[in-house]
Image (spheres, rainbow, N blue to C red):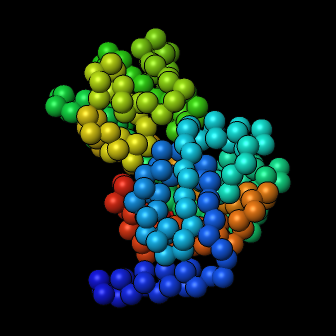
């Protein structure tokens, strides 16, 4: 089975490398999870194709605004509904749309700190109410869901005064530094910061999976190279990297 998987990767790389397109520099817009995957498989893709990847990241909502403002790029990997909106606006090519990966929401504490109980919805609720401070993104895709969830759990008001919402993807860093007791963000973000400890995913009954979807810029001069990249992200090598980073294929 391992030999078969390796063969699939090799065949996929050969097919991409056989493309007649000349080498290109591909500018990728995305969030931290995009950079994590690109750092893993990027060198393999670059060796096979001769293309060079340049990854620019921020909170996905910020990257979407940069696209809307006309900043040049080749491939965007944003949250699914953001990608769909940009397709409707003509910024992204519809037939290149591809769900790449999905990530669940998790809870982080500082490494070495006491691990709180989040095993059930009620336990998660008690932990949130008992925490001295909480942080989650100001504009993250998970934020939309969490704001609604806390309202449904009737704890939004109780949490408001002790909740910090950074504008950048610094939730896990704040927890690792001991500035905040609990962080709530997509699981791969937590795993990317050594000083942060993943407590676990929020209970399955209230879990929400964030889907990250790729598409090519309508104005990109590197259409075929960009298509090759999206194909590679969905290849066995891409899927393996996605799973290693705590996510599932889209």
Give left or right: position of 130 versus 136: left
User: Can residue 7 be seen in this snapshot?
Assistant: yes
Across and down, in percent, residue 44 comes to: 43, 69
* Residue at screen point 39% across, 63% down: 241
Q: Quadrant of the N terminus?
A: bottom left
Of residues 153 and 27, the one nearer the viewer is: 27
Rendering quarter of residue 134: top left
Across and down, in percent, residue 155 comes to: 46, 21
* Residue at screen point 49% across, 80% down: 13
* Residue at screen point 61% across, 49% down: 29
Give left or right: position of 20 versus 205: right
Q: Quick check: 166 above or below 24?
A: above
Of residues 193 and 21, the one nearer the viewer is: 21
Give left or right: position of 228 versus 13: right
Q: In the orientation shown, which residue stands out farthest toward the top?
A: 161
User: Can residue 187 be seen in this snapshot?
Assistant: no
Of residues 244 and 229, the one nearer the viewer is: 229
Rendering quarter of residue 2: bottom left
Across and down, in percent, residue 163 comes to: 44, 18
Across and down, in percent, residue 212 comes to: 56, 54
- So how many labels did they put on this image? 0
Q: Quick check: 70 above or below 15?
A: above
Q: Quick check: 162 above or below 207?
A: above
Give left or right: position of 231 versus 74: left
* Residue at screen point 43% across, 37% down: 185
Rendering quarter of residue 227: bottom right
């Amino acid at each position: 089975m391992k030999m078969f998987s390796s063969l699939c990767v090799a065949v996929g790389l050969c097919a991409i490398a056989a493309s007649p397109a000349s080498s290109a520099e591909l500018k990728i817009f995305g969030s931290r999870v995009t950079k994590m995957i690109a750092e893993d498989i990027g060198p393999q893709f670059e060796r096979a194709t001769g293309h060079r990847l340049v990854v620019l990241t921020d909170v996905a909502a910020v990257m979407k605004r940069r696209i809307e403002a006309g900043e040049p790029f080749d491939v965007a990997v944003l949250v699914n509904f953001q990608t769909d909106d940009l397709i409707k606006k003509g910024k992204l090519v519809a037939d290149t749309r591809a769900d790449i990966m999905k990530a669940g929401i998790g809870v982080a504490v500082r490494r070495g700190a006491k691990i709180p109980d989040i095993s059930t919805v009620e336990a998660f609720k008690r932990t949130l109410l008992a925490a001295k401070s909480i942080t989650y993104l100001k504009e993250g895709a998970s934020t939309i869901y969490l704001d609604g969830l806390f309202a449904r759990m009737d704890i939004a008001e109780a949490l408001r005064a002790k909740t910090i919402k950074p504008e950048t993807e610094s939730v896990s860093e704040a927890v690792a530094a001991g500035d905040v007791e609990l962080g709530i963000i997509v699981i791969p973000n937590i795993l990317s910061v050594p000083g942060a400890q993943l407590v676990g995913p929020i209970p399955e009954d209230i879990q929400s999976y964030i889907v990250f979807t790729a598409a090519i810029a309508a104005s990109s001069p590197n259409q075929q190279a960009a298509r090759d990249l999206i194909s590679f992200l969905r290849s066995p090598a891409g899927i393996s990297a996605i799973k290693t980073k705590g996510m599932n294929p889209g």
